Amino acid sequence: MENFIEIMDRFYRELDAEIARVEKVNADRMHCKPGCHECCIDNITVYEAEAAYIRHYHPDVLEQPPHAKGACAFLDENGLCRIYEHRPYVCRTQGLPLRWVEYEADGRMVEFRDICPLNAEGTPVELLPDDQCWDIGPFEQKLADIQMQLRNGNLKRVLLRSLFKPTANK
């Protein structure tokens, strides 16, 4: 069996390739850049597999104090992500025009769309062709499948802030 890090690296390569495609077709509206951290909030949870991935690549960061509560624990004093290259799925898709489907009790399918207000300029997200939006679902399922495989069927999630060593929180 492939090792865990190789599985996660491959997942993120595939994810980043699809994100790059969506970013490219939305280049005129994307204003996300280093230092923009409006969406980097506290209380974000990730699957244990993603937490282990962060622990693998960033044990040094986890020894340092987390960012003050209210914002993501992984931000530095300048609002930059200290684990950017290995950030979790949810962080990678922030800012993109999002599209997802939910089902009503009667079985009717309802489509929803959203986008970061900083990236809302231009064609309203509701009018974008489907392929210009990030479809919530397919990659989340791939990540859940990895979690199930690696964590014996457990879909437990953990707070990003909880990854820091207790001594780093003082």
Image: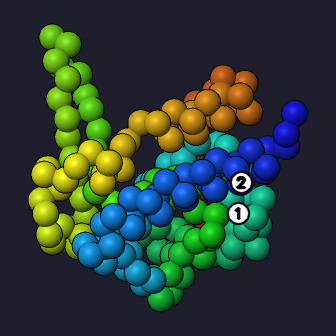
What numbered label is drawn on residue 66? none
**Could you say whether the residue bearing mark 1 is in a helix, strand or loop?**
loop
What percent of the width, then of the height, locates residue 73? Answer: 52, 68
Pair 1/2: label in front: 2
What percent of the width, then of the height, locates residue 85? Answer: 63, 69
Is residue 66 in sight in this rendering?
A: no
The residue drawn where x is 50% and y is 87% is 77
Q: Quadrant of the N terminus?
A: top right
In the displayed structure image, the side of residue 72 where residue 118 appears, left or right: left
The residue drawn where x is 58% and y is 39% is 143
The residue drawn where x is 60% and y is 76% is 82
Comparing 66 with 149, the one in front is: 149
Mark 2 nearby-residue class (10 Å; few <14, some 14–19, many ≥20) = few
Q: Quadrant of residue 39?
A: bottom left
Comparing 69 with 22, the one in front is: 22
Q: How is the image coloured?
A: rainbow
In the image, residue 145 above or below residue 139: above
**Could you say whether the residue bearing mark 2 is in a helix, strand or loop?**
helix
What numbered label is drawn on residue 9? 2
Is residue 77 in sight in this rendering?
A: yes
Which residue position is annotated with label 1?
165
